[in-house]
Image (cartoon, rainbow, N blue to C red):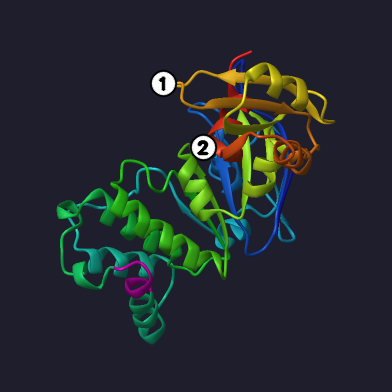
Amino acid sequence: MIHVEELTKYYDDLCAVDHINLTIDKSEILGLLGPNGAGKTTTLRMLTGYLPPSSGMIRVKDFTIDKDLLEIKKCIGYLPESAPLYHNMLVYDYLNYIADIRGLQNEKKTARLHDLAELCGLKDIMHKSIGELSKGLNQRVGLAHAMMSDPEILVLDEPTSGLDPNQIAEIRKIIRRIGTEKTVILSTHILSEVEATCDRVVIIDKGKIVADDSTQALKQSGGKETIIHLCLLNASFDDVKSRLSAIDGIDTVQQVETEDGSSLDIRLSCRPQEDPRTAIYNCVKNTDWILIEFRQETKTLETIFRELTKEN
């Protein structure tokens, strides 16, 4: 659906996007994740044809950005971070105006306005002035604008920025519904947004792609080690360290301080691709120790994000 090769953008001497390569499949919800200033918005503006790249190639379907810009724009609906709305217009009048611009007429226009009002939850506010709406409702109107021509690809730049939790949940629900039929690309720096909405995550930092995979795969591969926590009673640290250190796959055995000191909390650092949990359990079972907690630490997307984008 979308194929990007060596895409680069310079602002004078500043390299905002640095030779990125990316392929996005049909009916995929892709999250472009990165800290502020990482190059997310610049990348989206180049993908949508609103900003020319300094170098590189963008192909959408069988069209290339340098030769078929108008055809590519026909395939894409774009919602920037601040929806470009006319605040003195009623919601219905505004969407009707956008439909006219898009060339929709008569029954086709009426049906499209009805479908978008249903999809974006606008039925009860079609008679209201856009200037009276909350930011969450403004985003829904902007989403309806971007969807007016029924594009195959929807590009959303920070679609939930500044919204409250209820509004965020509503926008997420709409995006997931759209993603069952269309390719959706959304940029954000909100990690929970990606986990709740996206099939695939691309993390960009300082203009470069530093990770590209599904959320689950990133969690499984994002760390250099696996951490296992044990909580034991009737055990001494020296004895525990001696026994567990002998298990293949365990690098370090550390005691974790607890508030009351009633139990022995142990942190095990294990080598990547190793899973010594069965051996650990059998070791504990063959002693008089009482096991009251045994868990493997799960890498969160937040932890992986910090590791990949932190300053050297």
Residue 191 vertical position relative to residue 92 in the rendered view, above or below: above
87 relative to 202 in the view: left or right: left
**Quarter occupied by the N terminus:** bottom right
The label shown at residue 259 is 1
Task: Point out the residue furthest to the bottom here.
Answer: 107
The quadrant holding residue 184 is bottom right
Which residue has dot 2 on it?
41
Residue 307 vertical position relative to residue 2 in the rendered view, above or below: above
Q: Is residue 299 visible?
A: no
Instruction: Give SS at disc 2.
Output: helix
The spot of residue 95 in percent (x, y) is 31, 66
The quadrant holding residue 152 is bottom right
Is 286 magenta? The answer is no
2 relative to 75 in the view: left or right: right
Q: Foreground: 48 or 281?
A: 281
**Which residues are drawn in magenta?**
116-121
Tell me which residue sits at (62%, 45%) in the image. Answer: 201
Instruction: Give SS at disc 1.
Output: loop
